[in-house]
Image (tube, rainbow, N blue to C red):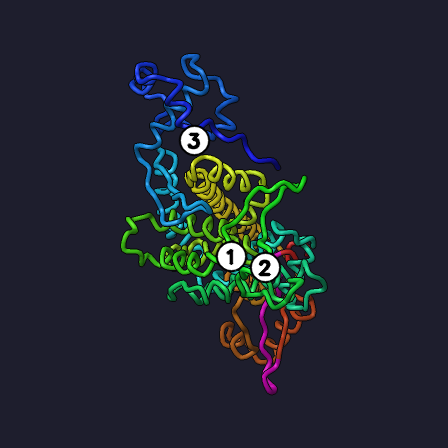
């Protein structure tokens, strides 16, 4: 993709238009907080309000935005501050995300159930690991990647290795929610996501050094889209980024935690401190801060799967920010939409799984292949997929003889509806992955 067209400079516009020309449109509310947050590259193609010139519309819009401008501690390569504004869309989405990602009652009942939680979390982590890697070039199919992660087999190529590394990084983040962010922790996460995937293995977990050529971001025609800060600045910039993430900067005004997590995502991606794997590390840091701030439902939401569906919009949100006076609002709005789409996708997924479970339960009741005891065990297992059963527990539950209980379980084992392992001579049974589809096919 190409760089968006840069807006005309405010200095030039102030020279071109007098206060007398600008004031009527300010009084009319043009460029206000309710309007879509267009970048100049898009606004210049839109029909203008009242038929005014696009340049005048842009000037009024920029003046409106400047009224709620808030600076963040991030500086660009020229030492100019990044900032963001407060359009109505940002306030509304921030409020919705804040309430939903802390978990509402409907979500809580389904995803905090001890038997279901791990299943949902693992599915989400797998999805995030796959799509975050695909955004950076991993070329394996989703089916193959899921099979590798669930089977626990070794990766066969670099693409699968990237996905496995991402999965390990997301698992590691789960244990870091109570820890403060530090440059060492950032480098540790980078080392995990790039393990055995870099041309120079020594650069895993190491920021670029002054004597190395800085890694820039290019388009398909080899034009530079983003030139990160000099390597000499990276240690100081990363230390400042960690202080920002931890809320430790004295001059740092209050910033909503979700916005802070989004800015952290942008910050690491902007500084681009590593030879490779910057995007994956940036998205991992976003998850760390969200979990650290108590947004536990984020464990179940894969932002990369949604970004992967529209990667151009993701890239544009970075470029819009950099080409319009370092206005982070574009990136914040994009990521808030991604978050809310992720929550909506989770809600639809849970509704579908609930509907499927009820259909399978009805199907199970109609089957003549099993007796009532076997049906009761399978119905329980559908709701508690991590539960273990023994012949003794089955016989006690149904007040039958040992031989009858043993026969019930072994018949289910024979039909591959249970799997069994032994501890000494004692047999333990549990349902295999994919029990729902196996029952549906009976």
Image point (38%, 26%), residue name: 61
Label 2: which secondary element: loop
Q: How far separated are the C-alphas under marks 2 and 3? A: 39 Å
Foreground pick, 177 / 101: 177
Would you name the residue on which mark 2 appears? 212
Which tag, 2 or 3, sits closer to the chain's start? 3
Between 181 and 109, the one lying in front of the other is: 181
Q: Position of residue 231 (x, y in %)?
A: 51, 57
Give the alpha-carbon distance from disc 1 to disc 2, as whole Å.
8 Å
Q: Whole-percent x and y of residue 102?
A: 37, 52
Q: Which residue is mark 1?
A: 231
**Which quadrant does the N terminus fall into?**
top right
Residue for point 41% across, 20% down: 57
Q: Quadrant of residue 394?
A: bottom right
Q: Is any part of residue 364 visible from this angle?
A: no
Mark 3 Cα shell of 10 Å, populated few (<14), some (14-19), many (≥20)? many
Picture quarter with the C terminus:
bottom right
Query: Left of 247 or right of it: where is 127?
Result: right
Question: Mark 3: which secondary structure?
Answer: loop
Between 165 and 391, the one nearer to me in the picture:
165
Graded by Cα atoms within 10 Å as few (under 14), some (14 to 19) or many (20 or more), the crowding at tag 2 reads few
Is residue 48 in view?
yes
Tell me if residue 297 is in the magenta stretch.
no
Percent of width and height locating residue 246: 35, 59
Q: Secondary structure under badge 1?
A: helix
**Extreme-top residue of the structure:** 51
Q: Are marks 1 and 2 in contact (CB under 8 Å)?
A: yes
Front disc: 2 or 3: 2
Query: Magenta segment range?
Result: 422-436
The disc at residue 42 is: none
Position of residue 49 relative to residue 285, above or below, is above
Q: Which residue is mark 3?
A: 37
């Amino acid at each position: 993709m190409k760089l968006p067209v840069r807006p005309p400079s405010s200095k030039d516009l102030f020279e071109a238009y007098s206060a007398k020309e600008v004031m009527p449109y300010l009084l009319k509310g043009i460029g206000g907080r309710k309007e879509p947050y267009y970048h100049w590259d898009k606004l210049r193609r839109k029909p203008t309000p009242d038929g005014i010139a696009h340049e005048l519309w842009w000037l009024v819009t920029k003046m409106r935005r400047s009224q709620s401008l808030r600076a963040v501690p991030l500086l660009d390569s020229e030492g100019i501050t990044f900032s963001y504004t407060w359009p109505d869309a940002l306030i509304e989405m921030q409020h919705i995300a804040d309430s939903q990602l802390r978990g509402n009652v409907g979500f809580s009942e389904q995803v905090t159930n001890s038997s279901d939680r791990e299943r949902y979390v693992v599915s989400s982590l797998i999805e995030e690991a796959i799509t975050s890697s695909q955004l950076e070039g991993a070329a394996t199919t989703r089916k193959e990647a899921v099979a590798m992660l669930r089977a626990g087999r070794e990766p066969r190529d670099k693409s699968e290795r990237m996905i496995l590394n991402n999965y390990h990084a997301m698992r590691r983040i789960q244990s870091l929610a109570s820890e403060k962010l530090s440059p060492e922790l950032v480098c540790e996460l980078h080392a995990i996501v790039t393990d055995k995937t870099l041309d120079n293995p020594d650069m895993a977990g190491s920021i670029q050094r002054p004597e190395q050529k800085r890694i820039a971001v290019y388009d398909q025609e080899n034009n530079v889209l983003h030139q990160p800060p000099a390597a000499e600045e990276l240690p100081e910039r990363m230390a400042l980024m960690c202080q920002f993430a931890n809320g430790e900067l004295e001059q740092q005004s209050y910033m909503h935690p979700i916005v802070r997590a989004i800015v952290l995502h942008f910050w690491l991606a902007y500084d681009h401190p590593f030879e490779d794997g910057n995007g994956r590390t940036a998205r991992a840091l976003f998850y760390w801060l969200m979990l650290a701030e108590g947004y536990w439902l984020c464990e179940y939401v894969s932002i990369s799967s949604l970004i992967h569906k529209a990667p151009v919009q993701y890239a544009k949100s970075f470029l819009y920010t950099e080409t319009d006076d370092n206005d982070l609002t574009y990136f914040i709005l994009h990521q808030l939409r991604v978050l809310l789409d992720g929550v909506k996708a989770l809600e639809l997924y849970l509704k579908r799984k609930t509907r499927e479970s009820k259909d399978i339960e009805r199907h199970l009741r109609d089957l003549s292949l099993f007796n009532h005891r076997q049906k009761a065990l399978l119905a329980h297992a559908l709701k508690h997929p991590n539960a273990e059963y023994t012949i003794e527990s089955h016989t006690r539950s149904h007040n039958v003889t040992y031989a009858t209980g043993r026969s019930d379980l072994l018949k289910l084992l024979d039909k591959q509806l249970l799997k069994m392992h032994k501890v000494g001579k004692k047999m333990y049974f549990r349902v295999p992955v994919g029990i729902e589809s196996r029952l549906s096919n009976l």
